[in-house]
Image: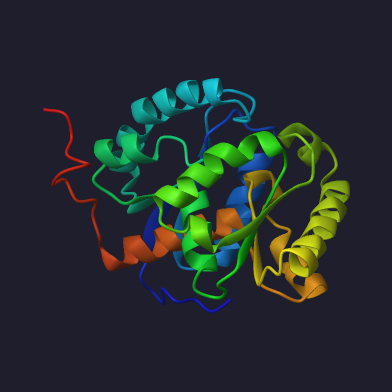
Amino acid sequence: MANFWGDIVVAVLHVIPVRARPGRVERERARLAALAPGVDVHVIDLPQGPQDLEYFVDDHAAVGQMVDVLPGYVRTHGIGAVSIGCFYDPGLWELREALEVPVVGIGEASLLLAGTVAWRLAVLVGDWKWVSKMQANAHALGLGHRICGWRSIDRSVQAMQDDPEEAYRAVRRVAVAARDEDHAEAVILGCGALSGMAERLQEEVGMPAVDPVAAGVLLACALASLGLRTSKIGGYRPKG
C-alpha cells in the first residue's frame, strides 16, 4: 500500500476494548503498521476488561475503563486520533466527550467507507444477537437504508478466534448468499474477530469486502493527518 502520509508521522491509537488473548495486541500492531507506513500505530487492550463484548452488560465495564485510561494515554503519547475496535462502537459518544482528538468506531468507519464503493451493503456478523444494536447504530448514522442484508455465521467471538480458517469458510458462504440472494454490492465484516479476512474474501467473491479494523484505523489516520479535533459545541461538550 502506498504511504499516503509521506514523511509526516502521526500517531493513532487502536483500542481492543476487551482482555485480548496473548499475542493479539502484538499481531494487530504489526498488521496495522504495515497498512499505514509512516504512522505511529499504537494498539492496546483492556487487561481488566471483559473477555468479549457479545453481551450488552459487558459494554459498561469496557466503556468505563476506556474513559478512565484513554485521556492520560492520549496526552502522554501524543495521539492524534483513536479507533475503537468493536463493531458495536462502545463508548463512542462518551469518548468523544472526554477526548479532544477524533474518535471513530470500526462499525461507523466500515459503513461510511463501504458506502463510497457500493450502494447495497451486506453486513456479516457472528451471531444474530448482535444485529439489533448494530442495526440501530446504522440507522442513527443515516445508512440503515443502504443495508440490504444482515448475515450471521452463527459463531461466538471465541469460536471465531479458536478456528479462524473455519470461520472464514462460514464467512465466505454467507458472503456468496448476500451477493446472490440479497443482491449486495459490497460486504462488511461485522466483527473485529473477522479482521484480516477481507482481501481474500474480496478476491474470491468478486466484490468489495471491508475490513472493520483497517477501516477504523485508516479513517483515524486521515483525521489525525488533517489535524481535526472533536467539536465541543453541543453534543460533545464536556462536563464542567
Tell me: 54 left or right of 166. Answer: left
Q: Position of residue 59 (x, y in %)?
A: 50, 26
Name above or below for residue 104 compared with residue 200: above
Can I make out residue 178 in this image? yes
Along the line of sight, the residue nearer the viewer: 147 or 64? 147
101, above or below 159, in the image: below
Residue located at (75% from left, 68% from top): 179
Image quadrant of residue 240?
top left
Residue drawn at the location 77% of the way across and 39% of the way down: 161
Rendered location of residue 154, percent (x, y): 79, 39
Q: Position of residue 214 (x, y in %)?
A: 56, 59
Q: Is residue 168 left or right of residue 133?
A: right
User: Count the marks: how many?
Assistant: 0
Q: Is residue 238 left or right of residue 130?
A: left
The residue depicted at 54 percent of the width and 26 percent of the height is: 56
Q: How is the image coloured?
A: rainbow
Up/down of 204 relative to 228, above or below: below
Q: Residue at x 72, y 68 (%)?
A: 199
Query: Which quadrant would the N terminus be assigned to in this image?
Result: bottom right
Q: Nearer the viewer, residue 165 or 131?
A: 131
Vertical arrangement, residue 93 with respect to residue 36, above or below: above
Tell me: 224 left or right of 210.
left
Q: Is residue 85 visible?
A: no
The image position of residue 107, as x and y in percent, is 52, 50
